[in-house]
Amino acid sequence: MELWFKERQTPGLEIGFKVKETLLRGRSPFQEIAVVETFQYGRLLALDGMVMTTEADEFIYHEMIVHPAMCTHPRPRRILVVGGGDGGAIREVLRYPTVEKAVLCEIDREVVEASKRFFPTISSGLDHSLVTVVYEDGMTFIKGKEGEFDVLIVDSPDPVGPAESLYQAGFYAECHQALGPEGILVVQSESPLLHQELVASIRRNLLEAGFREALFYWAVVPTYPGAMWCWALATKGPHPLNDFNSERCRSIQPSLKYYNEAVHRGAFALPNFFKNKITG
Amino acid sequence: MELWFKERQTPGLEIGFKVKETLLRGRSPFQEIAVVETFQYGRLLALDGMVMTTEADEFIYHEMIVHPAMCTHPRPRRILVVGGGDGGAIREVLRYPTVEKAVLCEIDREVVEASKRFFPTISSGLDHSLVTVVYEDGMTFIKGKEGEFDVLIVDSPDPVGPAESLYQAGFYAECHQALGPEGILVVQSESPLLHQELVASIRRNLLEAGFREALFYWAVVPTYPGAMWCWALATKGPHPLNDFNSERCRSIQPSLKYYNEAVHRGAFALPNFFKNKITG
């Protein structure tokens, strides 16, 4: 017998993973949580049937959602990750000795528990003494906070259901207020190939929320729809190309599998269709 | 009824496209040729059940296999494309007014005919007065040629069956000889995520064949296995970063959807795993 996990990425597009073993299949108050062991990509975490991360390619996504901001902010000490219950973003944040506190705000405790149980290499930072895990809706948690964070990372699922509010100007305005004067917000921003309207709206909403600038950067995430994936880096001050800290980037190189200074600069190089159709 | 075309990209990985209509399904002396109209990516050409190109993402692959070499060579006049029967690489080559002749050497006449019939926007250059189409095996065609081309592009399928010889040092040595003194060879080189051994062997074989340097560059091709795709640029002289011709690149910008100078430089920025495991 062959077992396959298949995700309908769009109504006309599917990705399928041959499965060795089903490790978890359950339902939290928020969503269906499944963990399978695949032949091609190692263990795979799916929420409501959509791939969130796999052992084999998670390094790309997690390094890219964290390091561009961390190597741009002048002194990133206080970090907030909204979503990202697998812990991958927190693991990357902890690579910097400047970090004094890292908060993970994840709505679903069972995602964190599944990651601790089945993805030890991804969730490895969650029990670190500098880390606090808060189980709360991101919008509720951030509301009213002022200048408490240097870097804020929104590692959210697709904008359907409860995550939808995390793509709105109202949420970004709260993020803006929660950041210090040189604060940087990073938002996972879906695929510039398949979700052009959404990507364009993220930038508009970030600028409407008061950020000085919002720049996109991209990488390939082979298990996500369209495989070309992007993030918006919205800043109150420092610029990711002009204020890039080469020395800090070099200092963390030995532990990284994807990110380096050339990759950083290359990631902000947008193909013509991306520049013209989305940020134009 | 729902129709889906599915490709088993690796034994454990599958991609599926919902199909509106089957336009062609035939067998040439070399392979099975199919054209389907998909919902997500427009028309799709498959050879022996493997996706070769789609209307929606072909611009990435075809711009990236052609322009880095064309913007690096000091005066690219005589161009050879081996494989690439869909005509996409030839279309991109013809964007340069310096081009005096462009030869397409494709083993399978029926691929060219299918492309002319079903992919007019991809095959548009094949009837151009500067273009010659030769139906021959690439190795046979190139053997014994001396200094006849400035840029040589190997747009070959995966290294199984007849295409296997196109990945060997013997073929690359013939390419080296067929190129002028500042000649550049570009080789489509599969996925650095899924085919690391093969990618590493391509570089070794290119250096063994006498090229001064062989550098990889990459882009995302969402319909190919692993989605992260790379090409090797092997050079007898000019360097793709140091000798890049910005002015020439700017002059063709209005017709491009992907490639620009920043993308060129970013494409040569290799992630750590790529540098360390493959070119190290």
Image (cartoon, coloured by chain):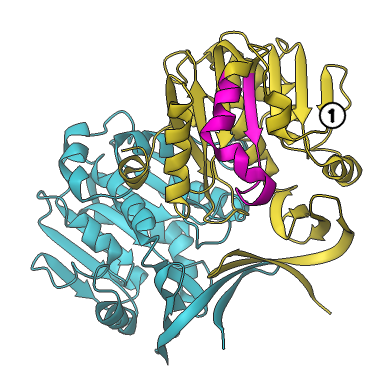
Chain colours: A cyan, B yellow
Q: Is residue B273 left or right of residue B183?
A: left
Q: Is residue B77 depicted above or below B16 in this figure?
A: above
Q: From the image, which quarter does the N terminus of chain A lie in?
A: bottom right
Q: Mark 1 highlights which residue?
A: B126
Residue B58 appears in the figure: yes
In what element is the residue under mark 1?
A: loop
Q: Is residue B162 magenta?
A: yes
Give the chain letter at badge 1.
B
Q: Is residue B229 depicted above or below B24 in this figure?
A: above
Q: Where residue B72 appears, x then y in whole percent?
A: 53, 17
Q: Is residue B66 left or right of residue B269?
A: right
Q: Where residue B278 appears, x then y in whole percent?
A: 37, 43
Q: Which residues are magenta?
A: B151-176
Q: Where residue B234 appears, x then y in whole percent?
A: 50, 25
Q: Nearer the viewer, residue B131 or A99?
A: B131
Residue B225 lies in what quarter of the image? bottom right
Q: Amino acid at mark 1?
A: Leu
Q: Is residue B37 magenta?
A: no
**Image point 47% across, 47% down: which residue?**
B198
Residue A22 lies in what quarter of the image? bottom left
Q: From the image, which quarter does the C terminus of chain A lie in?
A: top right
Q: Is residue B148 left or right of residue A165?
A: right
Residue B249 appears in the figure: no
**Image point 82% across, 57% down: which residue?**
B34
Q: Where residue B204 appears, x then y in whole percent?
A: 42, 34
Q: Nearer the viewer, residue B184 or A104?
A: B184
**Image point 52% across, 79% down: which residue?**
A49
Q: Nearer the viewer, residue A123 or B7?
A: B7
